[in-house]
Amino acid sequence: MQDKATNLPTAPFLVRLAAMVYELLLVVAVVFVASFLIIPLVGELQAPWQRHLFQVYILAVLFAYFSAFWLRSGQTLAMKTWRIRLVTVDGGRPTLKHAALRFAIALVGLLLVGAGFWWALVDRDRQFLHDRIAGTRLVRVPRKA
């Protein structure tokens, strides 16, 4: 896989945006189900400690969701649909360190009005900032014959 993945082109920016819209729908469903599991345990989230616990829990659920897919196949369901795969810069499979760094930096980029995503418009390889820093890239997977 490594030799093939290094030859694959970077996924186009608009395709990555389309995959993110689809991913958003999936993530909303994941958060919805995860909320049903914790709210009966912590109550109505009126106290600050309850809200903070809920926020940390949701971040952990989202990290588990993304990292499980990235580590297993390099693709979430949305990425499979749009034929995008996460690989390291040398074409290998991402490690837990890659996944954690990518997730954390993407989260910070989202909090900064999507700055990490808009970075791709000025990056020489059209990579997102979190991919550039984490040592990963999103490649376009060819159609199966």
Image (spheres, rainbow, N blue to C red):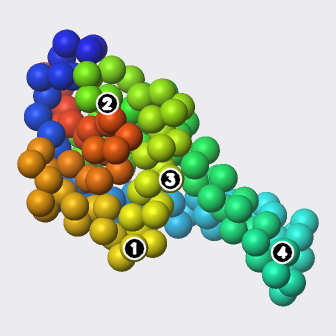
Question: For this rendering, which residue is in front, 94 or 27?
Answer: 94
Q: Give the farthest residue toward the bottom.
A: 46
* Distance CA(mark 1)–CA(mark 2): 25 Å
Which secondary structure lies at badge 3? helix
Quarter holding residue 64: top right
Residue 33 in sight: no
Residue placed at 25% from the left, 22% from the top? 90
Q: Mark 3 points at which residue?
A: 104
Q: Residues within 10 Å of mark 4 (few under 14, many from 20)?
A: some
> Which callout, 1 or 2, points to the residue nearer the camera?
1
First along the sequence among labels 3 and 1: 3
The relative height of residue 84 versus residue 87 in the rendered view (above or below) is below
First along the sequence among labels 2 and 4: 4
Q: Could you tell me the amino acid type at mark 1?
A: Leu
* Distance CA(mark 1)–CA(mark 4): 25 Å
Q: Residues within 10 Å of mark 2 (few under 14, many from 20)?
A: many
Which secondary structure lies at badge 1? loop
Disc assigned to residue 22: none
Q: Give the farthest residue toward the front.
A: 133
Q: Could you tell me the amino acid type at mark 3?
A: Ala
In the displayed structure, does residue 25 sit left or right of residue 49? left
Residue placed at 39% from the left, 64% from the top? 109
Q: Mark 2 points at which residue?
A: 87
First along the sequence among labels 1 and 2: 2
